[in-house]
C-alpha cells in the first residue's frame, strides 16, 4: 500500500508531521472500512449499507484508533513503542466532540470521542 508515500499540502495549525500522520490514518482506516464493507456485502450477500451505518462504523474505527493512540502515550507500558503526547494531541486536534471542555492533556481521560462536523 502506498498510503505512507502520500504528500498532501499543509493546511491546518498542526505540525506537518502530525498532519501527515493523521492523513495516513484517515486514508488507511477508510480504505480498510471500504474493503470490509464490500466483503461483508458480497460474501454474506447482504443489502448495501445505509449512509448512517457507514458513518457510524467509520467513526467507530476512528474512535478505536484514538483510544489506541492515547494508550500508546504511556511510557511505562509501551517504552519502545511510545507515541509522544504532543503528537497525539496535535494529531487529533480539532476533531473531538466537546473539545473546548476537555482538559489540556486529555490523553488519560475516559470517553473521548471523535466528533463529526455537521
Image (spheres, rainbow, N blue to C red):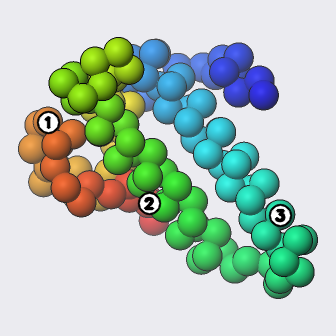
| Left or right position of 2 against 11 | right
24 horizontally vs 113: left or right? right
Quarter of the picture holding the N terminus: top right
- Tag 3 residue: 39
The residue that label 2 is drawn on is 116
Looking at this view, name the residue that lies furthest to the bottom: 47
Residue 33 appears in the figure: yes
Q: Nearer the viewer, mark 3 or mark 2?
A: 3
Name the secondary structure under disc 3: helix
Residues 73 and 55: in front is 73
Residue 86 placed where, x, y %?
26, 22
Residue at 48 percent across and 61 percent down: it is: 60
Q: Relative to 101, does residue 79 appear above or below in the rendering?
A: above
Instruction: Tell me, yes or no, if residue 13 can be seen here.
Output: no
Secondary structure category for the residue under label 1: loop
In which image quadrant can residue 38 be found? Answer: bottom right
Residue 21 pos. (x, y %): 51, 25
**Classed neighbour count for the residue bearing mark 3: other residues with Cα under 10 Å, few (<14), some (14–19), many (≥20):** few
The quadrant where residue 104 appears: top left
Pick whichever of labels 3 and 2 is earlier in the sequence: 3
Amino acid at each position: 500500500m502506498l498510503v505512507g508515500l502520500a504528500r498532501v499540502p499543509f493546511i491546518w495549525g498542526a505540525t506537518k508531521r502530525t498532519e501527515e500522520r493523521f492523513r495516513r490514518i484517515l486514508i488507511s482506516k477508510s480504505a480498510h472500512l471500504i474493503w470490509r464493507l464490500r466483503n461483508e456485502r458480497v460474501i454474506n450477500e447482504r443489502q448495501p449499507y445505509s449512509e448512517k451505518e457507514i458513518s457510524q462504523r467509520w467513526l467507530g474505527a476512528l474512535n478505536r484508533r484514538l483510544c489506541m493512540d492515547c494508550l500508546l502515550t504511556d511510557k511505562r507500558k509501551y517504552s519502545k513503542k511510545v507515541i509522544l503526547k504532543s503528537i497525539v494531541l496535535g494529531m487529533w486536534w480539532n476533531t473531538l466532540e466537546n473539545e473546548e471542555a476537555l482538559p489540556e492533556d486529555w490523553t488519560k481521560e475516559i470517553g473521548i470521542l471523535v466528533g463529526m462536523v455537521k
